Image (cartoon, rainbow, N blue to C red):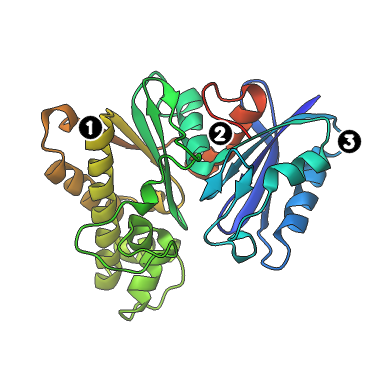
Amino acid sequence: MTALALDIGATKFAAGLVDPHYGVHEVRQVAAASDDPWRTCRDLLVAVAGDNRVRSIGIGSAGPVDVRAGVTRPLNLAAWRDGFTIVDHVRALFPDAVVRFAIDGACLVLAEHRVGGLRGVDNGLALTVSSGVGGGIIADGRVVVGRTGNAGHIGHIVVPGDDTPCPCGGFGCVEAVASGMSSVRWARSRGWMGSNGLELAAAAHAGDAIAVAAMARAGTALGQAVSSAAALLDVDRVVISGGFAQSGQPLWGPLRAAVARHCGLEFVRGLRVELSRLSDGATLVGAGVLAVDGGGQVSSA
């Protein structure tokens, strides 16, 4: 029998087969169709499952979510923003399978804790910085899920002194300031002519003044958010993944400088902030952990 992992991202869906050691294979990825996301997701799952008998499925979803109700409400997926019963739909597609569901940040930190940079760490934080900003928390060796399953939503920590509108309805959220998409929008509003985060990072490495400023703005905001979260949660390691996190010194220099500036208390002064070794597929790996063994203390629908 087969275990499946599904990652519901802001702009794409990914799925794969999971082995007992949390390796994810036969991965397929598709854009999240704006008119009928479920059809796209369903076709992806059926294609990945093939002729295998599916016994369990782990789902990691962009948030907000309601884990108890099995509902996802991704901010960047308009068709599901008011709520989609993803667990019920997946159960109907695979009626013999156990379906487990968590926000992407919980899957992210679960992956880092099992096979990544938080192995052996009882108190840590995992972030992803890509088209959005998400996160998850390990406290005393357990994944923190919160009342509705949204704990660790670090993308909506407010950056001091910033009032950039956020899709959540608030202002100054770190996701609205420091994600790849947000940074590109900020740079383009100031005359930069590129189109994506990869180009922005390359331009910053080449010394383009607007790109350098955009990356510094993002890195500083991330460093502020990490410092605030570390002081609140008393963690000793932070691991950051995601495509935009791969931008190198133009992002990480300001990020580390902000952490050094704001982590003044003794218990956070030695905070380690590292780039993930799991790259951009960590959420899918965490969904695979859910599928294989339930992720220990992670709640399921």
Residue located at (34% from left, 25% from top): 123
| Residue 59 position in % (x across, y down) | 63, 39
Residue at image position (36%, 20%) is 140
In the figure, is residue 203 to the left or right of 2? left
Q: Position of residue 235 (x, y in %)?
A: 28, 29
Q: Residue at x 41, y 20 (%)?
A: 141
C-alpha distance separating marks 2 and 1: 24 Å
Q: CA distance from mark 1 to mark 3?
A: 47 Å
Tell me the quarter of the image containing the C terminus. top right
Amino acid type at circle 3 is: Asp
Q: Which mark is residue 35?
A: none
Q: Which residue is mark 3?
A: 51
- The residue wearing badge 2 is 286
Label 3: state its secondary structure.
loop
Q: Could you tell me which residue is drawn at 35 percent across and 29 percent down?
A: 124
Instruction: Mark 3 and mark 2 in contact? Answer it, CB < 8 Å.
Output: no
Q: How packed is label 3: few (under 14 Cα within 10 Å), some, or many (20 or more)? A: few
Disc 3 from disc 2: Cα separation: 24 Å
Q: Which quadrant holds residue 177?
A: bottom left
Q: Residue 271, position in %: x, y?
A: 22, 32
Identity of the amino acid at label 1? Leu
In this rendering, the answer to whether 291 lies above or below 129 is above
Residue 147 visible (yes or no): yes
Q: SS of the residue at dot 1?
A: loop
Residue 206 in view, yes or no: no
Q: Are marks 1 and 3 in contact (CB under 8 Å)?
A: no
Q: Residues within 10 Å of mark 1 (few under 14, many from 20)?
A: many
Among numbered discs 1 and 3, the one appearing first in the sequence: 3
Residue type, mark 2 in image = Gly
Q: Which mark is residue 271?
A: 1
> How many badges with numbers are in the image?
3
How far across and how far down the image is residue 14, in percent?
65, 47
